[in-house]
Image: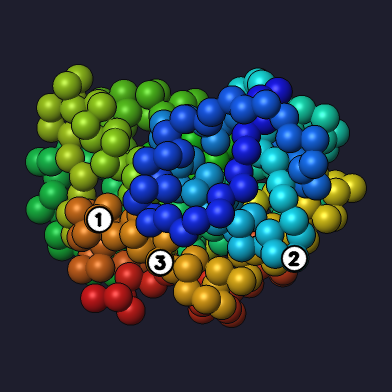
Amino acid sequence: MYPIDTRWRQRRSVMAATLGLLALPCWPQQETARDVYLIDHNFSRQDSRDRYTLLMLRAALDASSARYGDYDLRSSPLGMERDRLLSEMKKGALVNLSAQITSPEWERSLMPIRIPIDKGLSGYRISLIAGSQQARFNTITTLEQLKRLPLGAGRQWSSTAVFLHAGFEVAQGNSTANLHSMLAAHRFLHFPRGIEEAVFEQAAYAPAFPDLEVERSMAIFFPLPRYFFVTPGQPRLAGRLEYGLRRMLADGSFDRIFHDFYDELINKVNLRKRRIFRLDNPLLSPETPLANKAYWYDPLEHK
């Protein structure tokens, strides 16, 4: 495992911090570190979502340092798929902290910190379509009209259960690549994706499907919180992280990091001006903090 010295003593701008997160440096282990977080290997990826999550993690732990003292972050030596990651998280030997879209199993098995890291932005879905179909989507004004248009989703994705529960016709695929092939073959009319995913995948798959476009007029929203999860039996690590996040919410730094990181993307996809169709999420636990508006981003309140 590779320890990471994270005791920042000077205030730094959000963007400077973000650039510093592009790689996880290897530093000698600090014997005096009180709290050791063995973080999911995905935190070291270049994906912007993972860089944002690591940025938020560091900020929360820094915000807790006055009360809890120093800390270490160490990257798990193995990249793991979600099922293997959950299994190892239960043990806590290789990894004791991850950030994931919540599910009933993860909330039952681990200690969730029920503060949506990205303010629920993961729940806003915009669709990838054949550009020739844009005029058809422009005419959709009601949820019932939208339900009549078949969509694509992964067999084991949380979003698939939401769409099926709402009454959509869902063509299910085994992988993202498989679903893009199905969209190109006109097996369904639209492929709802998170806003980061939609922008990235349009660029990645357009060479093979030149008519592939990001649909421009609408979005689908359902509450889909991304939480930090901590391995069972380590309540101090969970308590410290929750304390830091709450301090950030109170002093406004949580929202500043969110907007500094995501506003450009939100503007790029014109999320604030889209028609938004809202769905219930039947998979959420009763503990989901839906009533706390400070936890959730609403584009219609930020026009």
Label drawn at residue 264: 1
Q: Amino acid at mark 1?
A: Glu
Label drawn at residue 67: 2
Depth check, front residue: 50 or 36: 36
Q: Amino acid at mark 2?
A: Arg
Q: Residue 121, percent across and down?
A: 43, 58
For discs 1 and 2, the disc positioned in front in the rendered view? 2
In the rendered image, the quadrant that contains the C terminus is bottom left
Horizontal side, residue 280 vs residue 261: left or right: right
Look at mark 3 in the image and give the residue it sits on.
Answer: 256
Depth check, front residue: 116 or 28: 28
Label drawn at residue 289: none
* 153 in relation to 119, above or below: above
* 98 in relation to 182, above or below: below
Tally of marks: 3
Assign a secondary structure to mark 1. helix
Q: Which residue corresponds to the image point at 62% horizontal and 47% vertical from the top-left?
A: 7
